[in-house]
Amino acid sequence: MSILEYNGAAMIAMAGKNCVGIASDRRLGMQAQTVSCNFQKVFPMGDKLHVGLAGLASDVQTVHQLLEYRLNLYELNEEREMSPQVFSTLLSNVLYSKRFSPYFIEPIVAGLDKDNKPFLSGSDLIGATVIADDFVVAGTCTGNLHGMCETLYKPDMGPDQLFETLAQSLLAATDRDALSGWGGIVHIITAEGIVTRELKGRMD
Amino acid sequence: HTSYCITSQSKRFYVVVVTVLAGCRLCLNIKNRKQRIMKQRQSYSSSRIIRLLLLSIISSSPHLCFGITRSNTKAEIDLGTTLVAIEYEDGIIVGADTRTSVGGSYVSNRYADKIYPVFDNVVLCRSGSAADTQYLANQINIEFRSRMYRYGGVETKPDPKQVAHYLRYLMMKGEMKASLICAGYDPKTKESSIYCINPNGSIMKENGGYAVSGSGSTYILGHLDNTYNNTTATLREEEDAINYVVNTVRLAIERDGSSGGFVRIHKISSTDNHVVSAVYPKHHQTTTTTPKTTTTTQRQHDLKGFAPPSRKH
């Protein structure tokens, strides 16, 4: 089992019409053993930006703290909010700066820019970014997640339909993975605010 | 140690193969191959030597190359499992989860049946490699059916002791990656018994009244140690015993990544044949699903009318 699969994770970010959603599972494990069912992997970085970090739990928490530090410093210096595109580039640079002893995480960024247009990007552990307009996935069951998203995704979904799509994709994909699941959490980011819902799924 | 020196005609390098006693035959193979090829060609390159070497290793001793070829072979299907067998008043209740995984992570079967009935009064609970255990179960079936036809007549049923010892005989070579529980009721002596057979072929009769096996068993052994003796007095009713087993397997499913799905229950008793049921454990509620809203403009935006997740279990 590779180091990226040690703790287990499943994460989707999907774009709708003037809204984005990001969903993750809640499991923290040590290979086969489950240690916790409410481990946070999606972190808010401002009002319209969320970053989801899949991978080694220690690096998830460290990179989250690092990004928060960099973001706060930027906002203090520049006196403006960080846009999602800039954040994604910042994340890529942070990861590449550790090119030869990397952080073992696979991050995804979901946010709305200042025109409330959705922005999604995903990255590998050393910072190669891909910007998508439909969905990005990360974690131990990316095959399952890609399949479910490809099937259920439609362009220009509203917030409630986006929530339904994210929830069903995540639950169905994690049902087929031994290392992720044990509940879920979905954040829908719209111009008006963020709605967070917890999913009740199979606890196995 | 024995060392052979195989040289390359290109004179760029020497391949020196140092082998321990067990692998001497390897080098002889390589030398033979090399001589055969040298008759055909004048010289051969470094990459060819390495390929020769690997080919000889792989063909002559498959279990020595476990490290080399492991990544090339298909991922083995593994029954990461929780198996529980307990004795109660009337007989035995056996419970198993239903998850089969490939490569440690992908769940290939969510509803696998890991309990194999041998005739009416004995069951075999399988954990370990799916292929090995299916083979063993099939061999048991073949052997005891042929014994029945040859020696006993149609009414003869095997007792669990015979089945367990034959399993041990099959597994003694140590090639099988399987750990089994064999449980059953013997109509002649009117006793139920549970046997554990370990991967290398040792057999243990569980006199304590319960047995566990599989990757999820570590999470529930303490629980069983603590609660079984306190509850045997109340395990007279079949339903109580079934609930006890379902609860135990559920605890393992919630903690073990390789166990999941339903809980399959088999009952073996003096009064009737197997009663087989598949039960989904009802677990305690997780955290509530009330939406929490945070706004930037101090206005509550209520997303009414969305459909709740429609997964019904």
Image (spheres, coloured by chain):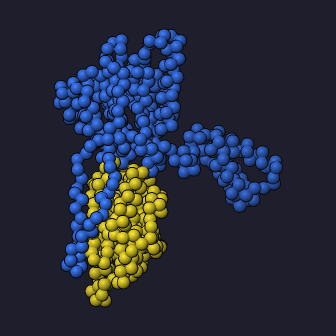
Which residue is located at x 71 percent, y 61 percent? B12
Which residue is located at x 47 percent, y 33 percent? B133
Which residue is located at x 36 percent, y 78 percent? A112
Colour of the chain lettered A? yellow
The answer to whether residue A140 shows anywhere in this view is no
| Figure disc tally | 0
Percent coordinates x, y for residue B278 in the rendering:
35, 36
Vertical position of residue B275 compared to residue A137: above or below: above
Of residues B136 and B263, the one nearer the viewer is B263
Of residues B219 and B6, the one nearer the viewer is B219
The answer to whether residue A47 shows anywhere in this view is yes
Q: Quadrant of residue A126?
A: bottom left
Percent coordinates x, y for residue B300 in the rendering:
21, 74
Of residues A29 and A49, the one nearer the viewer is A49
Identity of the residue furthest to the front in this view:
B305
Percent coordinates x, y for residue B1 in the rendering:
59, 42
Residue A39 as seen in the image, left or right of residue B108: left
Percent coordinates x, y for residue A132 in the rendering:
46, 73
Of residues B248 and A47, the one nearer the viewer is A47
Vertical position of residue B180 compared to residue A150: above or below: above
Which residue is located at x 82 percent, y 48 percent? B39
Q: Quadrant of residue B223?
A: top left
Colour of the chain lettered B? blue
Residue B173 as seen in the image, left or right of residue B216: right
